[in-house]
């Protein structure tokens, strides 16, 4: 008779699985709470201490750490010496192990009580999973509730072959690795400010992309927790690798204004349009004016619900992606006529960002890791006036928009905003004055009047030249961190041009 060992923290569907195994002729062995649940459900189950010949002890800390368990899992069935030794030691084979681990993640989300957290670190469970995975040719290791029916089906028709067992083995090692990563990262976060001797980055696959940045590269989306599972729904089309990075940039900007009707248009990771007006339709129209050429084939993030009227306006040009809180049925109907457009929603009235606590970038040979940057609302309200002239109420609103967009755009970056809409942007330049001049030049080419606009720079102006260019263009207010050894010259230039100048003292480089 084949023997199965079931020991799970998440007991959903375990009774059904146990009864399925019983029907297939398995003898069921179980532990603690799982044993009680199976016994109450009428499963003919053997309690673990009858196998180990030793009682569970130390408040359940020791249950399965026993040679009768691990010997039964680990001995090789096709090795005559192993078979003989198992017989001499009276060790019975365990042919299937079903384990999921103590709820460490749920515990740290629920409490800060370190003693309770420690007690929810599983020891015996990961050990059984690893033992079973090591001997996967002889032992089926089941760690995923979603595999119960498939395992029963494979056992019933005799198709639990090497490839299937190997797939369960890979999943099992992923399961214990992710569990250990979670514990190590938590401990480093609690005791080493998140910067321990090792840094572990783990994510669960959401879906494969058709390819990576280019067709010759493979790609996939992974999530840290469940953000994309809960807040990313494909309405139309399939998200590519590049779509996802553009969507990320667009959402971060559009969602940073709370419940306001913000729209951000992104092309190749950079904003080419942004506006906040009284309605989403007005916001889109104004955002598009900033750079309609770049917006062609771009990604649009809508901080709200796309209705039919907005969809009809968007449908006038080719957009590759629209990501929104949600779409009405009428909007989806309008977009159905465009074959190439992709629509994604977040099942919400507004856009949602997970607000990850840390951020990292790959460099050749490793990665750099840091606390996530945060552009706080009070950075503008608490900014220090450095000029003779003070900004008007409308200019202060525009300064907030310009500051947030600049802080979320590739450095060096300069952003111009007028009446709630971005009118020019220079980003990713090697000098700040080049960013200022390029933005103004493009606005002039597009016939956009920047006179009366405000300007933001995500880092300080090292010289007064950018201020002089802004003054010639008719800029009326500027916000920047300050901190240059030539701040006095920048302040002097602002006063000469009658520009309101504010220092935030906070820099937002994005490289």
Image (cartoon, rainbow, N blue to C red):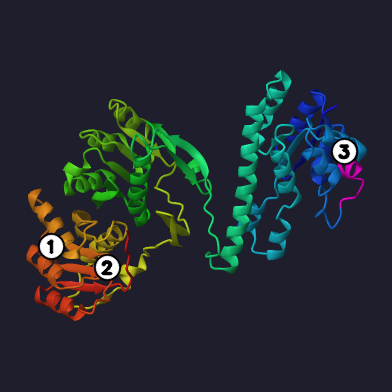
Q: Give x and y (percent) for residue 444.
A: 8, 53
Mark 3 vs 2, N-terminal side: 3
Local packing at callout 3 (Cα closer than 10 Å; few below 14, some 14-19, many 20+) is: few
Q: Quadrant of residue 112?
A: bottom right
Is residue 49 located in the magenta-colored stretch of the structure?
A: yes
Q: Which residues are magenta?
A: 47-56
**Which secondary structure lies at badge 2?**
loop
> In the figure, 105 relative to 98: above or below?
below
Q: Give x and y (percent) for residue 82.
A: 83, 36
Disc nearest the viewer among 3 and 1? 3
Residue 419 seen anywhere in this rendered image of the structure: yes
Q: Quadrant of residue 342?
A: top left
Mark 2 vs 1, N-terminal side: 1
Question: Who's the residue at 83% across and 56% down the image?
Answer: 59
Residue 459, disc = 2
Mark 3 vs 1, N-terminal side: 3
User: To which residue does mark 1 refer?
Assistant: 452
Q: Quadrant of the N terminus?
A: top right
**Which secondary structure lies at badge 1?**
loop
Residue 425, disc = none
* Figure disc tally: 3
Residue 11 seen anywhere in this rendered image of the structure: no
User: To which residue does mark 3 refer?
Assistant: 85
Disc nearest the viewer among 3 and 2? 3
Is residue 89 located in the magenta-colored stretch of the structure?
A: no
Question: Who's the residue at 79% across and 38% down the image?
Answer: 75
Q: Give x and y (percent) for residue 454.
A: 18, 63
Disc 2 and disc 1: Cα gap in Å? 22 Å
């Amino acid at each position: 008779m084949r023997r199965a060992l079931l020991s799970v923290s998440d007991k959903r569907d375990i009774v059904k699985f146990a009864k399925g195994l019983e029907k297939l002729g398995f003898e069921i062995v179980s532990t603690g709470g799982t044993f009680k649940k199976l016994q109450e459900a009428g499963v003919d189950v053997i309690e673990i201490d009858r196998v180990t010949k030793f009682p569970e002890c130390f408040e359940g800390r020791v249950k399965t750490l026993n040679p009768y368990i691990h010997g039964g899992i680990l001995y090789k069935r096709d090795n005559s010496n192993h078979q003989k030794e198992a017989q001499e030691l009276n060790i019975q084979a365990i042919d299937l192990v079903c384990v999921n681990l103590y709820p460490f993640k749920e515990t740290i989300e629920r409490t800060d009580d370190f003693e309770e957290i420690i007690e929810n670190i599983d020891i015996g469970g990961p050990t059984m999973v690893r033992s079973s995975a090591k001997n996967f040719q002889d032992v089926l290791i089941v760690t995923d509730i979603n595999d119960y029916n498939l395992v029963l089906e494979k056992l019933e028709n005799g198709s639990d072959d090497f490839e299937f067992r190997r797939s369960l083995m890979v999943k099992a090692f992923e399961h214990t690795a992710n569990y250990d990563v979670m514990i190590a990262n938590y401990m480093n976060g609690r005791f080493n400010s998140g910067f321990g001797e090792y840094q572990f980055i783990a994510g669960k696959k959401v879906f494969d992309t058709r390819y990576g940045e280019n067709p010759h590269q493979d790609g996939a989306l992974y999530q840290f927790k469940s953000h994309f599972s809960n807040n990313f729904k494909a309405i139309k089309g399939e998200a590519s690798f590049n779509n996802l990075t553009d969507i990320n940039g667009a959402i971060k900007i559009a969602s940073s204004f709370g419940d306001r009707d913000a729209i951000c248009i992104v092309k190749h990771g950079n904003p080419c349009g942004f506006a906040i007006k009284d309605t989403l339709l007005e916001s889109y129209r104004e955002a598009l004016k900033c750079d309609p050429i770049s917006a062609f084939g771009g990604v649009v993030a809508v901080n709200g619900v796309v209705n039919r009227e907005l969809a009809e306006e968007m449908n006038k040009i080719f957009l590759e992606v629209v990501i929104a809180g949600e779409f009405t049925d009428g909007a989806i109907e309008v977009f159905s006529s465009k074959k190439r457009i992709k629509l994604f929603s977040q099942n919400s009235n507004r856009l949602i960002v997970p607000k990850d606590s840390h951020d990292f970038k790959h460099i050749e040979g490793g990665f750099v890791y840091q606390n996530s940057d945060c552009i706080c609302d009070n950075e503008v309200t608490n900014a220090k006036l450095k000029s003779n002239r003070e900004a008007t109420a409308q200019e202060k609103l525009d300064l907030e928009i310009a500051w947030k967009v600049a802080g979320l755009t590739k450095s060096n970056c300069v952003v111009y905003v007028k009446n709630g809409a971005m009118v020019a942007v220079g980003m990713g330049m090697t000098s700040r004055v080049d960013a200022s001049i390029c933005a103004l030049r493009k606005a002039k080419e597009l016939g956009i009047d920047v006179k009366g606009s405000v300007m933001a720079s995500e880092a300080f102006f090292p010289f007064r030249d950018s201020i002089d260019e802004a003054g010639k263009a008719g800029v009326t207010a500027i916000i920047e961190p300050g901190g240059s050894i030539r701040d006095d010259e920048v302040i002097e230039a602002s006063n000469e041009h009658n520009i309101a100048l504010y220092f935030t003292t906070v820099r937002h480089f994005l490289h």
